Image: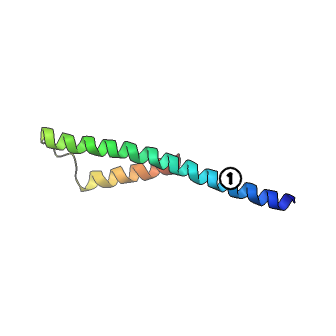
């Protein structure tokens, strides 16, 4: 009886952790999308070179680190 209850609790805990991970991922990706849109608008409106190969990789790396830290 207790083993089946512990197994169900383990499954519920895992599902809750996955849901929490997905919620944090959603928040980071939403914020990242907003920053990307602002970068494109800045580049188009002010004719500044904001987006380059290195900045894109730094941005993706920071987003991945934020998801894992949360």
Pick out the residue farthest to the right.
Answer: 1
Label 1 Cα crowd, 10 Å radius (few <14 / some 14-19 / many 20+): few
Q: Colour mode?
A: rainbow
Horizontal arrangement in the rendering, residue 14 relative to residue 56 (left or right): right
Residue depicted at 58% across the width and 54% down the height: 18
Residue depicted at 63% across the width and 55% down the height: 15
Horizontal arrangement in the rendering, residue 35 relative to residue 20 (left or right): left
Residue depicted at 31% across the width and 42% down the height: 35
Whether 15 is drawn above or below 43: the answer is below
Q: Position of residue 14 (x, y in %)?
A: 65, 56
Q: Position of residue 48 (x, y in %)?
A: 15, 42
Labels in figure, total:
1
Q: Position of residue 49 (x, y in %)?
A: 17, 46
Q: Which residue is mark 1?
A: 13
Q: Quadrant of the N terminus?
A: bottom right
Horizontal arrangement in the rendering, residue 68 relative to residue 36 (left or right): right
Pick out the residue farthest to the left.
Answer: 47
Horizontal arrangement in the rendering, residue 36 relative to residue 27 (left or right): left
- Which element type, helix, strand or loop, lies under badge 1? helix
Whether 17 is drawn above or below 38: the answer is below
Q: Position of residue 36 (x, y in %)?
A: 29, 46
Question: Which of the 4 image quarters holds residue 9?
Answer: bottom right
Residue depicted at 27% across the width and 44% down the height: 37
């Amino acid at each position: 009886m207790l083993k089946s209850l512990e197994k169900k609790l383990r499954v519920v805990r895992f599902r809750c952790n996955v849901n929490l991970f997905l919620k944090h991922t959603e928040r980071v990706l939403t914020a990242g999308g907003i920053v990307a849109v602002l970068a494109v608008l800045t580049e188009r409106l002010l004719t500044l070179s904001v987006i380059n190969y290195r900045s894109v990789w730094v941005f993706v790396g920071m987003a991945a680190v934020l998801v894992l830290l949360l």
